[in-house]
Image (tube, rainbow, N blue to C red):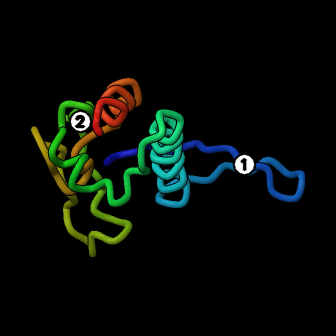
Amino acid sequence: MCANGLQFWTIIGGIPDEVGGTSAATPTVAGIVSLLNDARLAQNKSSLGLVNPLFYAHPEVFTDILTGTNSGGGGCNGTAGYPALKGWDPVTGIGSPRFDKLLALVTSLP
């Protein structure tokens, strides 16, 4: 799953600060999963548990990112980076989540 990790504003000790990267994207994805679990619990259903198999089985609930590349820095060990491709790719994963579609999917499951 790809979550935009740029230009996230936080307030630390009363001082606004812009953060980014995995430190911004990971809690965003966790928040999405939490909202999906909340919707299921409201229907007296179980929480989702491990979501990776579910997400990979339903790429239609994500927007596939087809253009762009990472710069090759930040953990790519000085490589030229990776391009966004149709379907799964190492820079955008399975794509950007569509909350409306994810919600419809998980609330339709037993």
Residue 75, quarter of picture: bottom left
Q: Is residue 81 above or below residue 79?
A: above
Q: Is residue 82 left or right of residue 29?
A: left
- Looking at the image, the residue that sits furthest to the bottom is 77
Which residue is at 85% across, 51% downward?
A: 15
Q: Residues within 10 Å of mark 1 (few under 14, many from 20)?
A: few
Residue 100: image x %, image y %? 39, 24
In this view, the residue in front, 67 or 79, is: 67
Which residue is at 21% across, 55% downward?
A: 53
Q: Amino acid at mark 1?
A: Thr
Q: Is residue 43 left or right of residue 98?
A: right
Q: Is residue 10 above or below residue 80?
A: above
In this view, the residue in front, 9 or 102, is: 102
- Looking at the image, the residue that sits furthest to the front is 44
Judged from the image, the secondary structure of the residue bearing numbered disc 1 is strand
Figure disc tally: 2
Q: Is residue 73 left or right of residue 37?
A: left
Q: Earlier in the sequence, mark 1 or mark 2?
A: 1
Q: Amino acid at mark 2?
A: Ile
Which residue is at 30% across, 56% downward?
A: 71
Residue 40, quarter of picture: top left
Which residue is at 49% across, 35% downward?
A: 39
Judged from the image, the secondary structure of the residue bearing numbered disc 2 is loop
In this view, the residue in front, 30 or 81, is: 30
In this view, the residue in front, 46 or 74, is: 46
Residue 26: image x %, image y %? 48, 56
Q: Is residue 31 left or right of residue 93?
A: right
On the image, numbered disc 1 is attached to which residue?
10
Instruction: Identify the image quadrant of the C terminus.
Output: top left
Tell me how far mark 1 sits from mark 2, CA to CA.
Answer: 27 Å
On the image, numbered disc 2 is attached to which residue?
65
